[in-house]
Amino acid sequence: MSALYLLDPAAVGTSNAMSKGEVLQALADRFAAVYDLDAVSVLEALEERERLGSTGFGRGVAIPHARIPGLRRPVCAVLRLSTAVTFDSADGLPVEVAFGLLSPDNSGATHLHALAAISRMMRDERLRDRLAEAQNDEAAYALLTNESTRDAA
């Protein structure tokens, strides 16, 4: 299952966030703008999940995620960070890419499958490098969706 079929092209962006809190805020703002969600509610849910343990996946990637009451389908947002940000990742490396994932509160296995798909994709060092080097947000989106389409085949 591919997680990035949940990704709107406008949900891929670049952020100048300088801290974990700013990354979570930037993701909440992106979710609000692209998917018409309440940024305050999204930020609260992301922060609540982060308090359970860092969503710093490792290898320069974080996957902040939460379940949102009333959401009808899972949605993703991706931020490439202008400056690597400390995220309390297990490997100690700062984060350069943050994948946000929001799922309906009753999504169960669907949420876990989407997290696993993002995780698998970000284990690919070549893809991570190409994503970091993408010329712009459109190129990053194309890279992510081409990769997910190839993996789904």
Image (cartoon, rainbow, N blue to C red):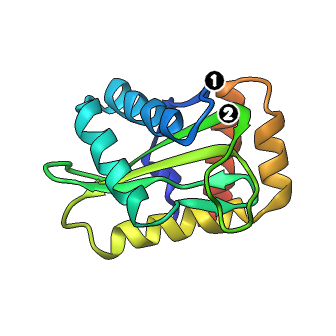
Badge 1: how crowded within 10 Å, few (<14), some, or many (20+)?
some
Q: Position of residue 128 (x, y in %)?
A: 78, 51
Amino acid on which disc 1 is placed: Asn
Secondary element at tag 2: strand
Amino acid on which disc 2 is placed: Leu
| Quadrant position of residue 89 | bottom right
Q: Position of residue 66 (x, y in %)?
A: 34, 56
Q: Earlier in the sequence, mark 2 or mark 1?
A: 1
Secondary element at tag 1: loop
Is the residue 71 above or below the residue 2 in the image?
Answer: above
Badge 2: how crowded within 10 Å, few (<14), some, or many (20+)?
some
Residue at 28% from the left image edge and 73% from the top image edge: 108
Q: Position of residue 68 (x, y in %)?
A: 23, 52
Residue 117 or 148: which is nearer the viewer? 117
Residue at 73% from the left image edge and 52% from the top image edge: 60
Please tell me how many numbered marks the rendered image carries. 2
In the displayed structure image, the side of residue 139 where residue 99 appears, left or right: left
Residue at 42% from the left image edge and 29% from the top image edge: 30
Q: Do the residues labelled 2 and 1 touch (CB within 8 Å)?
A: yes
Q: Visible in this render: residue 153?
A: no
Residue 120 or 138: which is nearer the viewer? 120
Outermost bottom residue:
109
Is the residue 82 above or below the residue 93 in the image?
Answer: above
CA–CA distance between discs 2 and 1? 6 Å
Q: Which mark is residue 16?
A: 1
In the displayed structure image, the side of residue 130 where residue 51 appears, left or right: left
Q: Which mark is residue 81?
A: 2
